[in-house]
Amino acid sequence: MRVLVLGSGLLGVTSAWYLSQLGHEVTVIDRQASPAAETSHANGGQISVCHAEPWANPSAPFKVLKWLAREDAPLLFRLQADPRQWAWGLQFLRECTPARARHNIGQLVRLGTYSRTMLQQLRRDTGIQYDQRMQGILHFYTSQKEFDGALNPARQMRELGCERHVISPDEAVTIEPALASIRPHLVGATYTAEDESGDARQFTLALARLCEARGVRFLMSHHITRLVPAGDSITHVEATDPSGRYVQLSADSYVLAAGSFSPALAAPLGLRLPLYPAKGYSLTAPVIDPSLAYEVSLTDDEYKLVFSRYTTQDSHGATEDRLRIAGTAELGGYERQLNETRCQGLLRRTQELFPGAADLSRGQFWSGLRPSTPSNVPLIGRSRVSNLFLNTGHGTLGWTHSCGSGKALADIMSGHLPEVDFAFQGMTRASRQSPAVNTVKTPV
Ligand SMILES: Cc1cc2nc3c(=O)[nH]c(=O)nc-3n(C[C@H](O)[C@H](O)[C@H](O)COP(=O)(O)OP(=O)(O)OC[C@H]3O[C@@H](n4cnc5c(N)ncnc54)[C@H](O)[C@@H]3O)c2cc1C
């Protein structure tokens, strides 16, 4: 089958890889000059099955209200005159009940565990390198209230097979000695040994090269302007090429993996994707004192920040050692401008936690738009347009879920049953268990 993948971020490139593995003829199209140039560019780096508690949870409505007027709030709604934002906000509130949060944790843990296994297998099969670290993920807490609030979701995750264990502050410092400087402030921690971290951009670029070696074609600097329907399917895609010339591209099937811009491409087809961009920030700074820098990937739940370390050695033995600090979310539309207050917040917290570890004066700030659903659960599978498939809406966990989503979508498109129990679009629970009854559920 000829497949055109729309978007070359983490989700587009992993889709292309697994589709080509199953023998399809794949082309990837993107407006950027190289893959991973938008949201997959400088994220937090965590492969975090343990980060499965969605933003929409029982404590969220109170926190969101409290944070409404705070410019440096970890989760900030900037209210706009945009009905899509309000509709998203209402759906978000509906996902905050204990029952919905529990359901969504289940979805995220199952997809996350499967995806981490797929990433490990890909690493074994290809030897792909992306400054990966397999030292687990440690959540630390300096607020008793925040720690108490994390215990129930962590228990739910353990019941679902994610080994996120509660540990004492002393055990946290033993696992990550760089936390010693804040030991007096630590009230508790959790540790998930099987989780990982790594540079998502390096991964995407390396996987794109492996795809090319298998014959996948990349049409970069091509701006998609329209998906053209006829009846219940797409006949072709309209785009402009690098010189601005109009081009038409056709395939048997299409994968929509355009991140936060997926809804705009889908809307003219009558598809309303419940996605809204959640802007996040990252700071990348060179390590100046390795003994003060963390090795284990960390999560600071209270500030909604994650910490990863990337250490690259080139062929001459020279080492590049960087800290990546990322997180916070701002729901205020599609602009990506860096807000000084939010950048300063990131710097301040890093300085408080790891003084002297990195040269923050040489730090580079970046922002990206997470394609977020109100539940944090991504949209993977069929759409109501017969030859359009979705792999989008991965929000905070697009790196964690990329390999599993790409593999499951490739399976669905090839008529195979996905290997993970997840609420795929266009498939009922029964059809997930038996390929013979592959009925359509009300796909978006
Ligand atoms: C600050 C921050 C920290 C994060 N940390 C983590 C983390 O630690 N762990 C984790 O699992 N996830 C993390 N994420 C989430 C993760 O980065 C995203 O979920 C993921 O990158 C989304 O990938 P994507 O392929 O859907 O979107 P993108 O990477 O944005 O790719 C979409 C592609 O579509 C292309 N495109 C869009 N419209 C068009 C058009 N009209 N024509 C042509 N091309 C088009 C774009 O150019 C882009 O290349 C983080 C995100 C942010 C912002």
Image (tube, grey):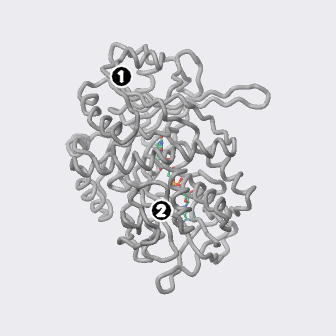
Could you tell me how far apart the alpha carbons at marks 1 and 2 are, in whole angstroms? 40 Å
Which residue is at 74% across, 31% downward? 314
The residue at 54%/69% (across/down) is 415
- Give the quarter of the figure containing the C terminus: bottom left
The percent coordinates of residue 257 (x first, y second) are: 52, 61
SS type, badge 1: strand
The crowd level at tag 1 (other Cα within 10 Å; few <14, some 14-19, many 20+) is: some
Q: Nearer the viewer, residue 283 or 140?
A: 140
Q: Mark 2 points at which residue?
A: 261
Residue 213 in the image: state x and y as whole percent.
75, 55
Question: Residue drawn 29% across and 51% down?
Answer: 103
Q: Is mark 2 on a helix, strand or loop?
A: helix
At 46% from the left and 31% from the top, the residue drawn is 137
Which amino acid, by three-letter code, is at mark 1?
Answer: Ile
Q: Residue 44 carries which label?
A: none
Residue 315 against residue 409 in the figure, above or below: above
State which quadrant residue 90 falls in. Answer: bottom left
Q: Position of residue 185 (x, y in %)?
A: 32, 17
Q: Is residue 425 left or right of residue 417?
A: left
The residue tagged 1 is: 167
- Label 2 lies in ligand 1 vicinity (Cβ under 8 Å): yes
Circle 2: is it few (<14), some (14-19), or many (20+) Cα within 10 Å? some
Q: Is 319 situated left or right of 292 in this image?
A: right
